Image: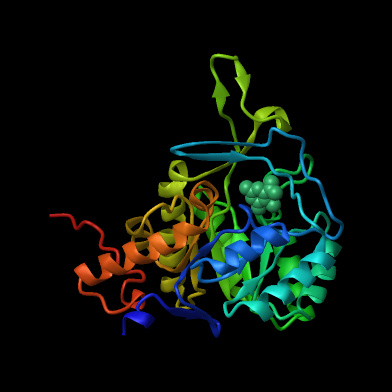
Amino acid sequence: MAKEMLSNEISRVKFNPIIMNASGAKCTYEDELKKLAASDTGAVVLKSTTVEPRKGNPKPKYWDNEFGSINSNGLENLGYKKTAEMADMLAKEFRKPVIPSIAGLHYEDYLTMAEELGKTKAAALEINLSCPNIPGKPQVAYDSLQSKKVLEKVRELTNKPLFIKLPPYLELIHQDEILEILLEADVQALILINSVANTLSIDAEKEQATILPKKGLGGLGGKFIKPVALGQVWSFHNKMKEKGKEIPIIGVGGIYSGTDAFEFLLAGASAVQVGTAYYQEEGKIFRRLKEELMDLLEAKNYKNVKEVIGKLKTIEER
Ligand code: RRO
């Protein structure tokens, strides 16, 4: 019984537990990936890859504290050929879903990578439309026509489940606009949310930005963004429910505890990912989160995570 308590399926991909890493933190190189895969993570999500290997942005490009992190990694990765090799190795050696992530610098890059990674043993492909840190390259997800073009063509090139990584849309009509495209495209999950773009932290003593790229601007993650992420999950969940077509949501942004994961389930997430907290606590965080979530479900008399999804109550007017 308890063994299946934290399990759920998205498009026939089984996650047990539904808690996994978010693309980005400590999932680029083979040694990191093997350590991650050996932990209690419910899946192995790889760092977003590009066609060619990249060193990414110049250092310092990461800052964090107890409330979260700001990164401007700039797509440091080994390129899609090596990523495909690593995905196959991980799928062979570990009995859990392996999910490579692709982030094209150009439209054609998405197609090349989707086709080739589609031939691997990956359980699904993450299509990252929301990298915030490449100077001169706006996020694809904020251009709905370009997003439509990418998603339609990628779908023609692979049969793998497609999990779409999105940024926050702080205006509701922008959510409606992208949702129309997502609901027409044949995609199997929405990953909400990527880091909050173009934020700044300052070292007041030095009177200096804490990271170097983009004059100090980078993507915000961790506790700072949990209410933003929950708001996106809840809003997209409600909008899809109203339309009668629900694409499962994977929630991410500020999960440090079992209670945080539970909140994302209530707001409509079918699974969750951990970015900054995994970076800070490393692989052992997955066992802790699993135990905390299991204890919470038991205390509340839930038999399975599935019973919690989207069950958030709103306050009624009196
Ligand atoms: O590599 C990065 O700088 C990066 C990416 Br691709 C992303 O999707 N989100 C993020 O916070 N950083």
The picture places residue 149, in percent across and down from the top left corner, at 76, 67
In depth, the one of 310 and 220 nearer the eye is: 220
The picture places residue 69, in percent across and down from the top left corner, at 54, 40
At 55% from the left edge and 49% from the top edge, which residue is drawn?
A: 279
Query: How many circles with numbers are drawn on the protein?
Result: 0
Identify whether 106 is placed above or below 40: above
Horizontally, residue 214 falls left or right of residue 164, namely: right
The picture places residue 260, in percent across and down from the top left corner, at 36, 56
Furthest toward the left, the residue is 318
Identify whether 88 is placed above or below 50: below
> Does residue 186 appear in this view?
no
The picture places residue 11, in percent across and down from the top left corner, at 55, 82
At 25% from the left edge and 75% from the top edge, which residue is drawn?
A: 302
Q: Quadrant of the N terminus?
A: bottom left
Horizontally, residue 263 falls left or right of residue 190, namely: left
At 63% from the left edge and 19% from the top edge, which residue is drawn?
A: 208
Identify whether 297 is placed above or below 76: below
> Does residue 85 appear in this view?
yes
Horizontally, residue 315 falls left or right of residue 147, namely: left
- How is the structure coloured here? rainbow
In depth, the one of 306 and 28 nearer the eye is: 28
